[in-house]
Image (tube, rainbow, N blue to C red):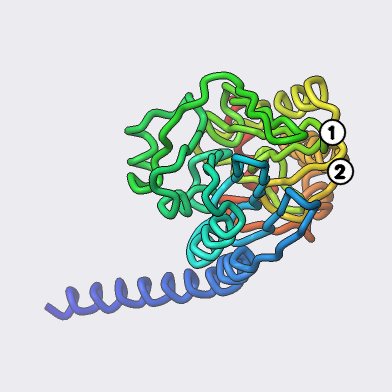
Amino acid sequence: MKTLKKILKWLLGIVVVLGAIGFTLFMIYVYPFMKKMKQTSTVQYDKELTLVIGGGGNSGILVSDSLVLVIDTKMGDAAEKFSQQVKALAGNKRIIIVNTHYHPDHSAGNKYFTGQTIIAGGNYTKEFWIKEADAATCPTQWLKDKMDIPMGNDTATLVNLGRNVHTASDVVVYLHRRKMLFTGDVVLNKQAPVTMGVADPDGYVSAFDQFQKQFVIEKIVPGHGEVGGPELIDTFRQYFADMKTAATDDSKKDALVEKYKDWNQMPFAMSPGATIKAIQKKMH
């Protein structure tokens, strides 16, 4: 009996220690990241185009005479506020939602647009979306390849990348007159990528090649982080090149990881270390 009590006391001690470690890691890494992610700022890019940064993934609202195009719908309280902002701009106009991918920080706000068209990548299925996201946010239309949507004096081209990049069916949106590309999480600004699940480091690099061949780009709205120019692609490309070097050369690993210390990241899921492990896993 005394032995059992000692074992239980020992196990309880382990649980308490692990709980303390978990709480500490949460407060150091997760809480600040989530707090920052919830913050939003609105940029009136021009008369018809509004960019809403943060609150989940970055979003765009493009208004034409008869149609409003929305790129990503955010999460949590930010999603509800964003939907109100969209509806105020839209009035009685039809709204088309484009989800760059299924992750809730980009799609949770879909539930506020019942009755509107919601487009997402066609490599997903309805069953997958319901399981991984939410039935209330499920798209109404699946994009298999590409689609052009006339938007007043501009044209929005939607492209399903069609291979594993950040997810199995990332969609990007290009505004031709503005030479602006909405990349979802295929390009980020000073944030390490999530390389879990089907995310493929080689897929990212392939997507960068596709963007630079297919589009003339002057502005990029990344999935997270501030709006920038085509240099965001170059920086993110260099990140993956550095992580590939780090994955194969231990003598350079520490310096290359240190190079990105000022980027938003979380250990094990969204960090240089996680990217290195994903690259090594694919190599083996």
Q: SS for tag 2? A: loop
- When the figure is inspected, residue 44 is found, relative to residue 203, above or below; the finding is below
Q: Position of residue 188 (x, y in %)?
A: 72, 46
Q: Furthest residue to the left?
A: 1
CA–CA distance between discs 2 and 1? 8 Å
Q: Nearer the viewer, residue 81 or 189?
A: 81
- When the figure is inspected, residue 270 is found, relative to residue 162, above or below; the finding is below
Horizontally, residue 124 falls left or right of residue 6, namely right
Q: Earlier in the sequence, mark 2 or mark 1?
A: 1
- Location of the N terminus by quadrant is bottom left
Contact, mark 2 vs mark 1 (Cβ under 8 Å): yes
Q: Position of residue 148 (x, y in %)?
A: 64, 24
- Per the rendering, the mark at residue 229 is 2
- Location of the C terminus by quadrant is top right
Residue behind mark 1: 217
Residue pictured at 68% horizontal, 35% vertical: 151
Residue pictured at 80% horizontal, 26% vertical: 215
- When the figure is inspected, residue 111 is found, relative to residue 32, above or below; the finding is above
Q: Nearer the viewer, residue 284 or 67?
A: 67
Residue pictured at 69% horizontal, 32% vertical: 156
Q: Residues within 10 Å of mark 2 (few under 14, many from 20)?
A: some
Residue kind at label 1, given as amino acid type:
Ile
Q: Position of residue 231 (x, y in %)?
A: 88, 41
Asked whether the viewer can see residue 58, the reply is: yes
Q: SS for tag 1? A: loop
Q: Position of residue 208 (x, y in %)?
A: 76, 29
Horizontally, residue 232 falls left or right of residue 149, namely right
Residue pictured at 44% horizontal, 30% vertical: 141
Instruction: Please tell me in which quadrant of the rendered image residue 69 appears.
Output: top right
- Per the rendering, the mark at residue 172 is none
Asked whether the viewer can see residue 251, the reply is: no
Q: Nearer the viewer, residue 8 or 97?
A: 97
